[in-house]
Image: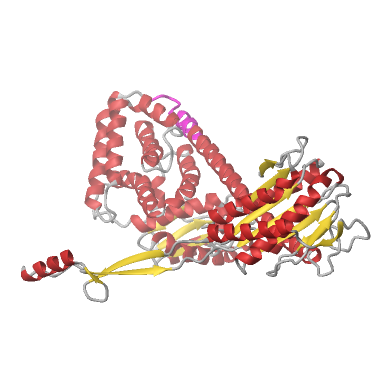
Amino acid sequence: MSAHHHVQSPATTPDDDADLARWDDDGAPPAQPRSSPHLWLRVGAELGDRLVALSGRQDLLVTCRPGTRSGAPAAFFPTLGEVEFDAGLFAPLQPHEINPRIVGDEERYPAAWGVFVHEAAHAAHSVWTQPAGANRRVVEAALLLEESRVEGAHLITRPTDRTYLRTSARTLVMPDIAHPTLQGIEHAAAVAALVLGRRDVGILDAGETRAVADLCEKVLGADLLATLTRIWTAAHQCADHDATTMLAHAKEWCDALDTAAPALPVPENLTDLLSGAVGVVMDHAAATDAADLAAQAAATNAIAARSKAQAQGRAQRAGQRRKAAATAKSVFNARGTTVTPDGTPAPYGNPVTGTRRPTAAEQSAAARLSRALRAAAYRERTEERTTSPTPPGRLNMRAALARDAQRAAGAVPTAEPFTHTRRRNSPSPPLRVGIAVDVSGSMRAACAPVASAAWIVARAAALTDPDSRTATIAYDRHLTALTRPTHRAPERVTTFDATGGHHNLGDAIDALDHGLELSRPGAGRLLVIVTDARYGSDETAQAVTRVKQLTAAGCAVLQLTLTAKSHHLPGTTLLHLPQPSSAPVAIATAATDAIRRTR
């Protein structure tokens, strides 16, 4: 095998190499034109910058040019402090297209970067030196074991480089298989060290290397393969500077082969068999990497799509809030005019028929509701008790005696005999009640009781807490404010009629939500929808979307219906009232429950 070519000890000086390089014409066919070597100087310099992070060494030089002196795709020269890199690994990219200094640029040439990471592993961990007079064959075996050892050591400190080391295996191992320097059993053993050794350090997966493992077991035998596996596994644990132990493992490797080789038959087409098995391994590894890359791309695309959807959702919600603010501003106008969905005054269709003075029963109901709301909003004072070794506070005699006993015993006193109680008032939560009443032709029976309920709730809220607010909107195709979200109690009851057509509950909810802040916690919040919900599909979908948003924000949503033919809006609490006159009581009860549940 030629794996040892990745760590070189040059026999000639750099000046000699430069002189020999001038003799290009040695009788061979004319050389094909290649990119000028000086264009690769920048690439080599930038690779040198990245080598610092990969190897942890700052004393190395990277040379990148077409072709290498060693003949290998890349090589590390320990005595020169140089990493030699073949520019052909970047093909078909040209020098001006390669920017290794930019982190992430390596994803455009993973094969070349994998070889570079492999050489960086040599530069970081192949720091042991062979002693003078060492057996050349033993040194070759040690360098063979070194291939997987340095990759395993590199993977410990930089586990994210595994993908590139897998790619480098295809670039570095396959040429050594096709053009072996070892023969017979030693060839098969070298293939096992290069492929199965990478399996045992976590570069390749066991399933991917099964073809080589089966062939090597058949050629080498189970016993010899187990012995070689034990040797390279032990070599993986060898320290970077421990040349003695590394050469001892290499000698054991050579002895095991010498002992077993005479008894093992060598297949005539062993090189072809090994090449085929390694090709299967590399194909499986390539397929696995492609699948992982596709899965990663799919995950990245999914994250990007989710981020895009979230951004679109935020933009849509922001647009909806702006539209709701504009709708609320146009609906709650001082003139009490009816507006269209786009906020312009409607030329016709105002359901308001006038105003009247509240009856004695309505005034009494507002007073009762106000008292009920105050009772529901009341919060007990909270108490916080703390202890201390000194006054102020109530003296606890048991703790005082314990403290005296601790002091008498010579211990550090830890008892705290004084107890202080701090009481704090809990603020009463305000109330927010929005009423949306359907004034299409089918809801005429609800007009009088809802008008009464709107005045009662608004009056009671104003009497309960100055921060409480209510509002009522009558909706069909257009929107009309019957009561507005102000702090002042209405003096008169606004009466209205139901003669409209179509429905616009979605915009009505938006106006009430923005005007009363129904989506913001900190208050008792209730939305009452008085409707039979006999809508078209689009009208229902828009209303249900708003209702779900409010309920998700913690606002209670109550739907009051008057007839058995009414439909239920999903997400609302349905309350059927056979007697329309009971609507004020139902709304008052729901408002009381809403403020009682507020924390």
Q: Quadrant of residue 339?
A: bottom right
Q: Is residue 195 above or below residue 596?
A: above
The magenta segment: 266-279
Q: Is residue 191 left or right of residue 23?
A: left
Q: Please give the name of the residue rendered at 43% of the width and 64% of the height, measured from the top-left corner.
A: 381
Q: Is residue 292 magenta?
A: no
Give the residue at the far right of this rendering. Answer: 347
| Residue nearer the viewer, 273 or 384 | 384
Quadrant where the N terminus sits is: top left
- Say if residue 512 shows up in the picture: no
User: In this orientation, which residue lies closer to the viewer: 406 or 153?
Assistant: 406
Q: Which residue in the rendered view is the most extreme toward the left?
A: 409
Q: Which residue is at a point 16% across and 68% down the rendered structure image?
A: 400
Coloring scheme of the render? secondary structure
Residue 427 is left or right of residue 494, and the answer is left
**Left or right, 269 with reference to 498:** left
Q: Is residue 278 magenta?
A: yes
Residue 275 appears in the figure: yes
